[in-house]
């Protein structure tokens, strides 16, 4: 009789978890995690099942905990938290949609461009 090889399962501590479990582990609501996933897309990318459900790995949970610490305890803005995360995790947070105006009004920026073009 032939023995079949069994697939070795990933230990339960290393398996990706659904959003409800991630929510419990981090201590925030599931809708907050979904929002953070959109805002911090360059740092937070959970794997998806074939049905499209999110599964959070250990590193995703760590990023969520860091985001929570920065926003809730340290009282950083989202832009400030992105800067800290980019320093900590070594990724860029320079996306134009989330960069904000950095204290420069759009009219000032347009005026500078027009003045430079006239020269």
Image (cartoon, helix red, strand yellow):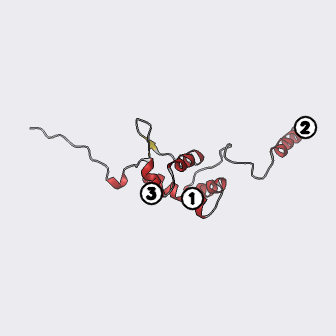
- The quarter of the image holding the C terminus is top right
Instruction: Name the secondary structure under disc 2.
Output: helix
**Which of the numbered marks, if any, corresponds to residue 118?**
2
Instruction: Name the secondary structure under disc 3.
Output: helix
Camera-nearest label, 1 or 2: 1
Count of number-bearing discs: 3
Looking at the image, residue 69 sits to the left or right of residue 79; the answer is: left
Extreme residue toward the bottom, this view: 74
Q: Quadrant of residue 25?
A: bottom left
N-term mark: 1 or 2: 1
N-term mark: 3 or 2: 3
Residue 26, percent from left and from top: 48, 57
Residue depicted at x 56% and y 56%: 67
- Residue labelled with disc 1: 88
Q: Is residue 111 visible?
A: yes
Give how far apart the Cα atoms at labels 1 and 2 are.
42 Å
Residue 30, percent from left and from top: 50, 49
Give how far apart the Cα atoms at labels 3 and 2 are.
57 Å
Q: Quadrant of residue 83?
A: bottom right
Extreme residue toward the right, this view: 119
Residue depicted at x 42% and y 47%: 18
- Residue labelled with disc 3: 25
């Amino acid at each position: 009789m032939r023995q079949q090889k069994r697939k070795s399962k990933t230990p339960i501590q290393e398996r990706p978890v659904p959003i409800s479990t991630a929510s419990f582990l981090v201590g925030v609501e599931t809708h907050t995690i979904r929002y953070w996933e959109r805002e911090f897309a360059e740092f937070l990318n959970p794997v998806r099942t074939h049905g499209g459900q999110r599964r959070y790995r250990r590193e995703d949970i760590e990023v969520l905990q860091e985001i929570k610490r920065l926003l809730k305890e340290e009282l950083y803005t989202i832009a400030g938290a992105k800067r800290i995360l980019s320093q900590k995790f070594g990724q860029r947070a320079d996306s134009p949609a989330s960069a904000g105006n950095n204290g420069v009004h759009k009219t000032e920026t347009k005026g500078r461009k027009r003045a430079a073009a006239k020269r």
